[in-house]
Image: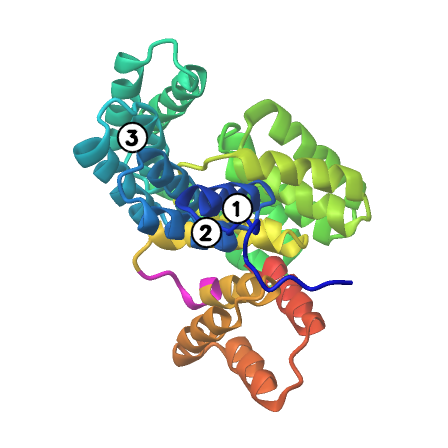
Amino acid sequence: MRMENSHEGVIAFSQSDHHFFKRGVHAYQKKELNKAAKYIEKAVQLNPEEAIYYCQLALVYTDLAEYERSNELLQHVLKNLDNTLYESYFLLANNYAYLGLFEKATEMATLYLHYEPEGEFALDTYELLDILHLEDEDTENPKYEDELILMYDQATLLRKRKKYREARSLLEKIIADYPSYWPAQNEKARMVYWEGETEKAIILTEQLWKESHYLPSACQLAVFYYEQGREKESSETAEVLKRLVPMDESHIYHVATALNHIGEHEEAYLFFKMYLSRRAMPDEDFFVNAGAAAYHTGRLQEALKWWEIAADNMHQEAKDLLLKHQNGSLDSQDMEMALSTFYKER
């Protein structure tokens, strides 16, 4: 075989901006979000005038729950690159909704429909506006009576103390007096479950979800199915949860903890990040559980940082996890036990 010293006829490989963009889109389609961000950031660096690159990178940042970074890129596109890239308004509307800035979300959604009344995302935008409208209605509704809230808090406290019969009795009184107070119905189903009547609890929760679409009931249902080995139903319910955009920050936390408990750690991590973007300083339980999601998804340094925050607030479980990590004995089983304990006690 004759070796050629000449470079004649050899095609030089050029890593152009388009090359990195294509690789980024391919990674995004495979849900390799951090890799997608790296490639598209490189494409932007090589060609900072291409507006589409910024929009795609903004989409990646949104899926990473980095909503502010996403918004910065979209605003840059509209202000400096291409003010006719109207889908930027749709993406901004979604980001503002995730951040709980509902007026801004409505403003951006309305702008998108003004420019693109029959555009690619018109139907999705109308659906978003419907959700935002419901959120406004909920905000305008009078709050439940103080007596009801105090009774419900007392029932929750009884349940945490494992006084299930007393908790259930109090919840039944609440439900009789306030039949549309869904948290009480959801909590009652939980009491029934911990008392061992698992099938009855599942039926109660299925009925509640069907009749009210109260989001925590779907979270609870996914966990019940999972713990009873009904993997197909648990997975189907989890897929519903993943597609939702909870407006209430407590509902975001419900989704995150449920997904974490049933092993959907990547999606749980993203919902925990979404919750953190809404709440300036969550409690220490948040950091233990978000840390577990980070640990399961290969984000060890972030997990350790969050557990250290919880440990600094005297959270014993966080201290135990950190000690096991230092001793080299931390494993997935420790995480599962921590998540199971938390879900029962929260």
Where is residue 302 shown, x and y percent of the image? 46, 69
Give whichever of 328, 170 is nearer the camera: 328
Please, what secondary structure does the residue beneath circle 3 have? helix
* Residue drawn at point x = 64 percent, y = 40 percent: 238
Residue reaching furthest to the bottom: 327
Q: What's the amino acid at mark 3? A: Ala
Q: Say which of marks 2 and 3 sits in front.
A: 2
Q: Say which of marks 3 and 1 sits in front.
A: 1
Query: Splitting the image into 4 quarters, where does residue 160 fall?
Result: bottom right
- The stretch of residues the image draws in magenta is 281-286
Decide: marks 2, 3 in contact (CB < 8 A)? no
Give whichever of 50, 109 is nearer the camera: 50
In which quadrant will I find the N terminus?
A: bottom right
Query: Whole-Å distance between the Cαs marked 2 and 3?
Result: 29 Å
* Residue drawn at point x = 46 percent, y = 35 percent: 245
- Residue bearing mark 2: 39
Which of the two labelled residues, at mark 2 and mark 1, occupies the earlier sequence position?
A: 1
Decide: marks 2, 1 in contact (CB < 8 A)? yes
Where is residue 95 shown, x and y percent of the image? 35, 38
Please, what secondary structure does the residue beneath circle 2 have? helix
Which of the two labelled residues, at mark 3 and mark 1, occupies the earlier sequence position?
A: 1
- Residue bearing mark 1: 23
Query: Splitting the image into 4 quarters, where does residue 337 fall?
Result: bottom right
Give whichever of 69, 151 is nearer the camera: 69
Query: Whole-Å distance between the Cαs marked 3 and 1?
Result: 31 Å
- Residue bearing mark 3: 105
Query: Whole-Å distance between the Cαs marked 2 and 1?
Result: 6 Å
Residue 155 shows up from this direction = no
